[in-house]
Image (cartoon, rainbow, N blue to C red):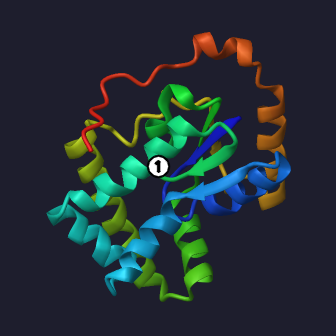
Amino acid sequence: MLITISGPPGSGKSTTAAQLAEAFDLDHVSGGDTFREMADERGLSPVEFNELAEEDDQIDRDLDRRLRETAIQRDDLVLESRLAGWLAAEHADVRIWLDAPLDVRVGRIVDREAKDLAVAREETRRREDSEAKRYREYYDIDIDDRSIYDLVVNTSRWSESAVTELLIDAVDAHDPASDEGQTPVEGVRYEF
């Protein structure tokens, strides 16, 4: 089974993806971890690396190509990234988008990364703007288009464990025979 978890920074992607991977005995591949490793290799923060990626499109293309190839080649994992649902496209069994209001997401980032609230808010805003611009330019993806997702969940409405339980139930209820009616991912330019 290939499950994708997508959403903005601080929405709970990493935590939820790890919990789903454990629940279904699947591997967990994180685009965010890979991106942060790439940034660290260059001695940059994720925000700085995002901005550099605006000037050097090969950064995104290399990351996205790896994630897409993983989705095409594997059917035993939870693939987690902002674009996971788009990159996995028709190969995904279940595509999930997680979200929460900006204040909630920034609060989580502050707790996770021990950052100043104002700094975290500005970095998150800049990061989201930068990524949305690049997704549109490179692949003609509107990151705000939720029509490709099987499930969209506001993670601020439930506890972490309740979100995971809700998603486990949804994945368990998934009927593979219904995939014929799955929303296709059309019009995306996969030009890596």
Say few, some or many: other residues with alpha carbon within 10 Å of mark 1 (under 14 / 14 to 19 / 20 or more).
many
Q: Is residue 163 visible?
A: no
Residue at image location 28% in from the left, 62% down from the top: 59
The one nearer the camera, 99 or 82, is 82
Measured as percent of width and height from the top left, residue 89 is found at 48, 30
The one nearer the camera, 68 or 147, is 68
Q: Is residue 46 visible?
A: yes
Vertical arrangement, residue 54 with respect to residue 189, above or below = below
Q: In the image, what residue type sits under mark 1?
A: Leu
Vertical arrangement, residue 56 with respect to residue 115, above or below = above
Task: In the displayed orientation, state which residue is furthest to the left.
Answer: 55
The one nearer the camera, 57 or 172, is 57
Left or right: residue 192 compared with residue 162: left
Residue at the disc numbered 1: 67
Measured as percent of width and height from the top left, residue 162 is found at 83, 52
Vertical arrangement, residue 23 with respect to residue 178, above or below = below
Measured as percent of width and height from the top left, residue 166 is found at 81, 42
Query: Residue 141 lies in what quarter of the image?
Result: top left
Left or right: residue 145 compared with residue 92: left
Vertical arrangement, residue 114 with respect to residue 120, above or below = below
